[in-house]
Image (tube, rainbow, N blue to C red):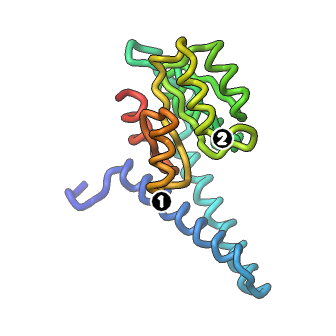
Amino acid sequence: MSSQDPTPEASFAHELREALGAMQMALEVLRRPADEGTRARMLELLERQVGILGKLADQCTVPAGGKAAPARDRSARRILVVDDNIDSAEVLGTLLEHMGHEVFVAYTGARALEVAQERRPDIVLLDLALPDVSGFDVARRMREDAGLAGTRIVGLTGFGSDEHRKRAREAGLDDYVVKPVDAEQLGKLVTA
């Protein structure tokens, strides 16, 4: 392999970014009024990209008898993932488990507060746009609980404005990350 050839990891990351980027743009086109021909083309594009994602997922499959997840080590954290998007929460939780962490998942702010009191996580990855209680309010309530004083609270959100960052600081969040977060960034985030 020449020094110009990308590594398998770099090729995988490139193909993943390309597929997700194309899907995001197609969905943006579909959000706008369009004729049936345009709509049909965008749906075909989405279908092709889902096929590409399926092939990429097949490349990641652990062979029978292989190790699926590393053993929990001293750097492992107890992490509470809070997100009302069930799929996002499950994927994030699974990724963190595969990194060797103990993970708890909550889909509402109220449940997040219950789980935090029961499990005393080291880190809370908190969606700030929850339907029942805002993530900002969840963070404030956690900060009022002396048993969670050492818990690091990281806001995960689609909003990156200065106003949102200011509100996050005021609510007591330790960090603020705009979604989507990639695996490398996530690993650094939870081990910092």
Q: What element carries label 1?
A: helix
Where residue 24 appears, as percent x and y from the top left, is 59, 66
Q: Is residue 20 above or below residue 171?
A: below
Q: Mark 1 points at which residue?
A: 17
Q: In this rendering, which labeled residue sits more in front, label 2 or label 1?
A: 2
Q: Which image quadrant: the N terminus?
A: bottom left
Number of other residues with Cα within 10 Å of mark 2, as a class: few under 14, some 14 to 19, many 20 or more: some
Q: Can residue 56 be seen in this view?
A: yes
Mark 2 → mark 1, Cα distance in angstroms = 30 Å
Q: What element carries label 2?
A: loop
Amino acid on which the number 1 mark rests in the picture: Arg
- Could you say which is closer to the camera, residue 124 or residue 30? 124
For image coordinates 63% across by 15% down, the residue present is 117
**Picture disc at residue 134:** 2
User: Residue at the spot x=55%, y=61% of the render?
Assistant: 20
Q: Where is residue 170 in the image (x, y as percent from the top left)?
A: 48, 39
Q: Nearer the viewer, residue 45 or 100?
A: 100
Amino acid found under the numbered disc labelled 2: Ser
> Residue placed at 79% from the left, 85% from the top?
36
